[in-house]
Image: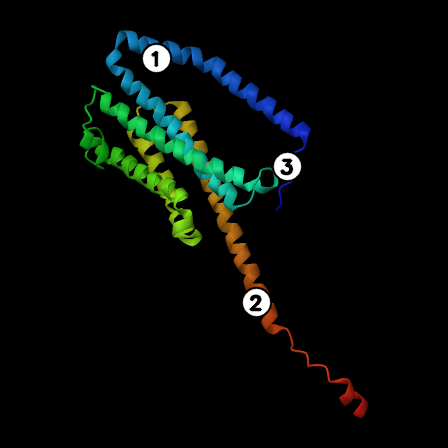
Amino acid sequence: MTYRGLPAPVRIFLALALGVAVGAVVAVTFPTAVAGIAGVAVATPEKLPWVSSRVTAFIAYLAIAGSVVYGLLLSTKILDAIAHRPVSFALHQDLAAVGLGLAGIHGALLGLDRTIHFSFVDLLVPFAAPYRPIAVGIGQLALYVVLLITLSFYARRRIGQRAWRTLHYLTFLAFAGSTLHGILSGTDTSQPWAFAIYTASTVAVVFLTTYRIVLSISARRERRASRLGDDRRPLTAPARPAAVRRAA
């Protein structure tokens, strides 16, 4: 599949639709969010790190999920017809880095929270947290996997394409761990909007992974059928030289 790009009217329509959607979400949620954060800051300032950590946690999760989805779209070549592959790959890499950075900020904010005290060791050592240690430990392991995958982007030329691709299978573990961490340890899990975020992200990853597996199996069958066809093709006798044909 080669890059063709979207027609200009489609690009304009999508840009306008995205602008309207983002504007509507911001207009509806931003005043309420600002008022809520301001109320917490004034009434109970000690809870501000806890609230901020929850916000950064969800943004980090969306960035990590977006990176996984973009990686699957790249592997299935769905985006190749509408976007240059280097641009898509750069976005895939940047989303992973943003998710990693925001996850680190999420942990640092927990260290500032006084509702549940997280020491430096609690933040770094999996399953040592004073709050839901199993769920938090799963998230810590997922964060270390994301760190490893993010660093692999910059070491791809040194480790080789095959090793880099093999290492990238850990992305699914990172996504699964992040999802479990959010569901099991998050205080907003019961909220409809949180449930929608986890559900939509999981459905997208599962669907694209299944589609990628189907494509891989189909490609293997085609290659196998092609090899069998070449093996069964009858061999043709070499043409006799012209002098031999005249003598005959």
Q: Position of residue 195 (x, y in %)?
A: 40, 28
Q: Nearer the viewer, mark 2 or mark 3?
A: 3
Residue 8 visible at all: yes
Within 10 Å of the Cα at label 1, are there few (<14), some (14-19), or many (20+) other Cα atoms?
A: some
Specify the label residue 37 is tagged with. 1
Residue sitting at the far bottom: 247
Which residue was labeled with disc 2?
227
Residue 189 visible at all: no
What residue is shown at x 42% (from left), y 23% (from top)?
193
**In the structure shown, which secondary structural element does the residue marked by tag 1 occupy?**
helix
Q: Amino acid at mark 2?
A: Arg
Q: Amino acid at mark 1?
A: Ile
Relative to residue 75, is residue 128 drawn left or right? Answer: left
Do labels 1 and 3 touch, CB within 8 Å? no
Q: Position of residue 131 (x, y in %)?
A: 21, 28
Which residue was labeled with disc 3?
5
Q: Earlier in the sequence, mark 1 or mark 3?
A: 3
Residue sitting at the far right: 246
In the image, residue 17 sits, relative to residue 150, either above or below, namely above
In the image, residue 169 sits, relative to residue 226, either above or below, namely above
Q: Position of residue 222 (x, y in %)?
A: 57, 59
* Viewer-proximal residue among 147 and 236: 147
Distance from label 2 to label 1 (Cα)? 64 Å
What residue is shown at x 50% (from left), y 46% (from top)?
75
Do labels 2 and 3 touch, CB within 8 Å? no
Do labels 2 and 1 touch, CB within 8 Å? no
